[in-house]
Image (cartoon, rainbow, N blue to C red):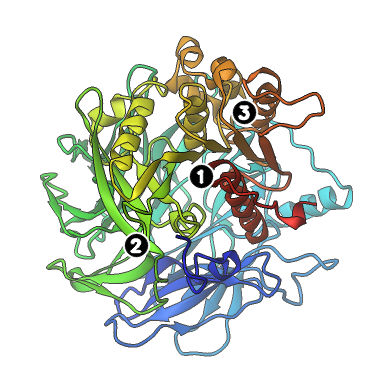
Amino acid sequence: MAASPSSPFADLDTYLALPRVSGLAVSPDGSRVVTTISELDDTRTAFVTAVWELDPAGGRPARRLTRGAKGERTPVFTAGGDLLFLASRPTKDSTVDGDSPPAALWRLPAAGGEAVEEFALPGGVGAVRCARSAAVTVVGAPLLASATDLDDDKRLRALRKDNKVSAVLHSGYPVRYWDHDLGPDRPHLLDAADGRVLTPSPGDSLREAESDLSDDGRFLVTSWHDPAPGAAIRGTLVRVEVGTGERTTVADDPTADLGSPVISPDGSAVAFTRETISTPLQAPRITLCCLRFGADIRELTAGWDRWPASVTWTRDGSALVVTADDNGRRPIFLVDPDTGAVTRLTDDDFTYTDVTTAPGGVIYALRGNYAAPQHPVRIDPDGTVTALPTVDAPPLPGTLSEVTATAADGVAVRSWLAVPEGADETNPAPLLLWVHGGPLGSWNAWHWRWNPWLMVAQGYAVLLPDPALSTGYGQDFIQRGWGAWGAAPFTDLMAATDAAIADPRVDGTRTAVMGGSFGGYMANWIAGHTDRFDAIVTHASLWALDQFGATTDGAYWWAREMTPEMAERNSPHLFVENIATPMLVIHGDKDYRVPIGEALRLWYELLTRSRLPAADDGAGPHRFLYFPSENHWVLAPQHAKLWYQVVFAFLARHVLGQDAEWPELLG
């Protein structure tokens, strides 16, 4: 039942070589649209991204614009139509002692010619914003906290490098984020025309901040992350005048974090998201707000039972364009900035991202789902969607359908089910239950890293459920699992599994579970609460909640999620003695969101306290795949390949009864 050898999902090298579309930018007049496409480099150990121009009408094929050896990212158009992007390219001044230069801002003139370096800093450039109707560009870049100016920043960086100093002295929280240590530099906003610092002495307030520049370039609005009690961070909104650097707090809500600001085209208002600060008893809620400068904040979507995921303005300022998870999709909606009325614009099975508006009510975006990778589209004012040619979608090795189960409390739990070609009641496929991370998320978009079709090509039916805590089903659906991860989310997953194996194409006698992050937590919880599965793969998983909360990179949000008593009730490690299912544990050492200590403790306790302990010679059915240089996701192509090879072999041994070999690169 495995896929045909010609299927790109049947061979990992072929799959990894598939080009991948991401990002989108539209010129101020709407005449030009660009995206970026990533492909494997010649060593097959890294992806290189280039900028491609699209035909807005959807007739001509895409045209490649950049060819840098290290790639280009974050394209944006200037008011005059030039294309700016970030790239790490050597110049006569940038390469020192053979080191690769940091990312700089480059300009590709609209009139043609070669790209030229526009703005560079020793610490690199991380973000760029251009005004639509003025020659103003603002960049985000890290500067050392003690530097007095750009020259001093260069001097101090050279001093640290020459003395091989990596130490950082912290006075606040956090100290690391996802897969990198924070400090000693801090993000700043600068005017790219002259390098003038617009946000002197910001502290840590601009870490992970989102900002928007007004069309006329006079000011920007940025999220501003202030320290809060309990080593927490609180998000407010700050307005910065580009000409003077004057900062003014324009929105501050002690009960919520404010973010994702977007300025109206006429500069009179800013729209933003408001996320209530959760407690162990109350899940957060995200709504859309609007502030007319000089007036009070208005909450626009208090009566809409969905969470805005992204927001921008139409070019004429008549509506806000919003995406939100909705029943396994993420459509585009229009929100009236005066009344808050919500109108659905797209009505298909896709998830939309990178939404960008153009004149005349036209919208450009990327869309994708589990039948097609992300690809650019144009949406006309009447909702008509036109795909813009870029990369052909790969043929799938199976079919996709929806399954709806009924949970014990009567709530509907929906899932995607991908089944191999050729599976039927006489030749049913073994089932792989794949639990999503988050937990506040949804299986609603194509994932290159977590791709079910690779498992389908191996002959498995893959179930992608959205249990309690998933987004897109309303606030009550999230609240069902809040602070009780081992309750409704677990029973929802079991109900979804029961519904899937009722399909005659699925073999309920051969089953496995796989999940990462929160999905890994659920895999661990399932391992200690049922023996119905033949194998379990747990990636980057939470195991011992008594230690996790204080060691994750954002301990303050965990304190908002569970009390110590809740953590004890919901900790998988307390049920290790019940585990009688072979487990494959996978973790990267550079994972700071779910620290490596979770996997180390899980591995030791599996070998010493589970019902399948290691024998005296150390042998046993469990395996631990460890990546010393990888993060939460395991992203390097060669490591992603090994990840799948080990998963294939482990499941083949315990689900299919095959004596599969481990990859020879593991020694």
Label at residue 172: 3
Mark 1: amino acid: Glu
Disc 1 vs disc 2: which is toward the camera?
2
Where's residue 123, x and y in %? 68, 56
Q: CA distance from mark 1 to mark 2?
A: 32 Å
Q: CA distance from mark 2 to mark 3?
A: 45 Å
Q: Earlier in the sequence, mark 1 or mark 2?
A: 1
Mark 3: amino acid: Gly
Where disc 2 sits, the SS reads loop
Q: Earlier in the sequence, mark 2 or mark 3?
A: 3
| Most foreground residue, 619 or 41 | 619
Label at residue 267: none
Q: In the figure, is residue 207 to the left or right of 168?
A: left
Residue denoted by label 2: 371
Q: CA distance from mark 3 to mark 1?
A: 15 Å
Q: Is residue 171 at least partly visible in the picture?
A: no
Q: In the figure, is residue 491 to the left or right of 157?
A: left
Mark 2: amino acid: Ala
Q: Is residue 552 at least partly visible in the picture?
A: yes
Q: Residue at x 39, y 18 (%)?
A: 280
Q: In the figure, is residue 364 to the left or right of 102?
A: left
Disc 3 vs disc 1: which is toward the camera?
1
Where's residue 557, x and y in %? 47, 27
Where's residue 532, x and y in %? 45, 30
Relative to 42, residue 582 above or below: above
- Callout 3 crowding tier (Cα within 10 Å): few <14, some 14–19, many ≥20: few
Where's residue 424, x and y in %? 32, 55
| Most foreground residue, 414 or 478 | 414
Relative to 103, residue 618 above or below: above
- Callout 1 crowding tier (Cα within 10 Å): few <14, some 14–19, many ≥20: few
